[in-house]
Image (tube, rainbow, N blue to C red):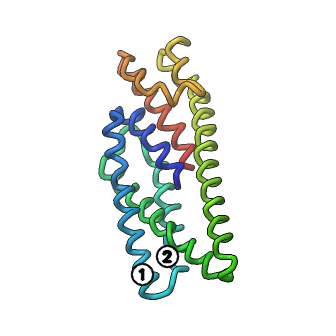
Amino acid sequence: HVGPEYYLPLWFQSARGASSLHSGLLLLPIVLSTASISVFGGVFIHQTGRYRELIWIGTLLLTAGTGLYINFGTGTSLGEIIGFEIIEGLGAGLLFQPPLVAVQAMVTQADTATATATLGFIRNVANSLGVVLGGAIFQNGMEHRVSALRAAGLNSTSIQPFTGGNAASSVNVIETISDEMQQHAIKDAYSWSLRNTWI
């Protein structure tokens, strides 16, 4: 679940023109919903001894929330952003504790430490892959949008910061483009490329 949180600030700063501080604040719905539902999940497991339903619901919400990000565009409202983030955050929060409880419940006490470490290792590898694969998808998406940027009137020198590996670090360059139509085309390119990452 690290992938979406890693790339959302890039979308906020590129497609919406948010500052780095503002993009951090826009992540609060995920943080708050994840923390609050995680506490609820722990209490629920403690009181009922059940965890499987939380894993199912968490997977459904996390998939739905991240899937809804494909609707993000340059004109997406703040309400939609917050709503989609809350759905994803609720799913992520339900997948913090229950999988660990499930793994520990399925192994002998002697294997508990090994099972816990294995789950932690797999989560870290999956998070790393999510970030790396998301970056590759985003960079390829920006390469595919070069023709749309040319069609908007940008020359090769102006396009260079927004291609491949340069794109993620060039969000501040967007504001230096004086032509409003060209600036909009660049924001659309970022939004389209990040849409592929959400998918």
Residue at the (57%, 24%) spot, across then down: 163
Residue 99 percent location from the top left of the image: 57, 72
Q: Badge 1: how crowded within 10 Å, few (<14), some, or many (20+)?
A: some
Nearer to the camera, 68 or 23: 23
Nearer to the camera, 24 or 74: 24
Residue at the (53%, 56%) spot, across then down: 1
Say which element carries label 2.
helix
User: Which residue bears the numbered disc 2?
Assistant: 54
Residue at the (40%, 79%) spot, across then down: 43
Q: Which mark is residue 44?
A: 1
- Identity of the amino acid at label 2? Leu
Residue 95 percent location from the top left of the image: 51, 67
Nearer to the camera, 13 or 32: 32
Instruction: Judge left or right: residue 74 versus residue 61.
Output: left
Nearer to the camera, 72 or 173: 173
**Proximity of marks 2 and 1: CB atoms separated by less than 8 Å:** yes
Q: Is residue 99 above or below residue 63?
A: below
Residue 56 percent location from the top left of the image: 54, 74
